[in-house]
Amino acid sequence: MTRSTTAIDGFDAVIHAPQRLRICALLDAVTQIEFSLVQEQLGVSASVLSKHVSVLMDAGYVEQHKAVRDTRQRVWLKLTAAGRTAYRGHVAALHAIVDQAQE
């Protein structure tokens, strides 16, 4: 297997969209995070974030659960095991693509 094939194998078009890549990066660093904190970090509206999270959930990469905190309903997000593997594989593929271009 060549390096270019290896890089392409890990590339994930679902994760590659800039906002979804940022969401995965945030989720990879934590066990779980509140939806509103992700929204704040990305600087996007709740509806934009919700659409990207839905794509990631449909792919099986993100799970959400709702819980009451401070008498308010909160939504928490976390990467699934498959999501963490896909995200890290995608990052490795990007590194391989960049490294190959610099050779």
Image (cartoon, helix red, strand yellow):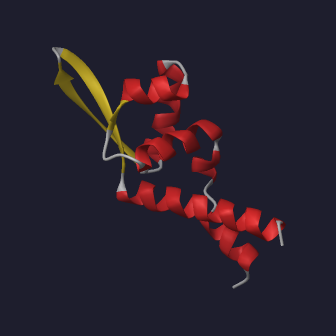
- At which x and y percent is residue 6? 66, 75
Identity of the residue drawn at 84% across and 73% down: 103
- At which x and y percent is residue 14? 58, 48
Q: Which picture quadrant has residue 71?
A: top left
Quadrant into which the N terminus falls? bottom right
In this rendered view, identify the residue nearer to me: 52 or 31. Answer: 31
Q: In this rendering, would 67 be left or right of 77?
A: left
Q: In this rendering, would 70 be left or right of 98?
A: left
- At which x and y percent is residue 15? 57, 48
Q: In this rendering, would 64 be left or right of 100?
A: left
Identity of the residue drawn at 49% across and 45% down: 24
Total marks in image: 0
| Residue farthest along the top direction in this orientation | 71
Q: Which picture quadrant has residue 96?
A: bottom right
Asked if residue 24 is positioned above or below residue 66 in the image, the reply reads below
- At which x and y percent is residue 102? 82, 67
In this rendered view, identify the residue nearer to me: 55 or 24. Answer: 24
| Residue farthest along the front direction in this orientation | 102
Identity of the residue drawn at 67% across and 60% down: 94
Identity of the residue drawn at 41% across and 48% down: 29
| Residue farthest along the bottom direction in this orientation | 1
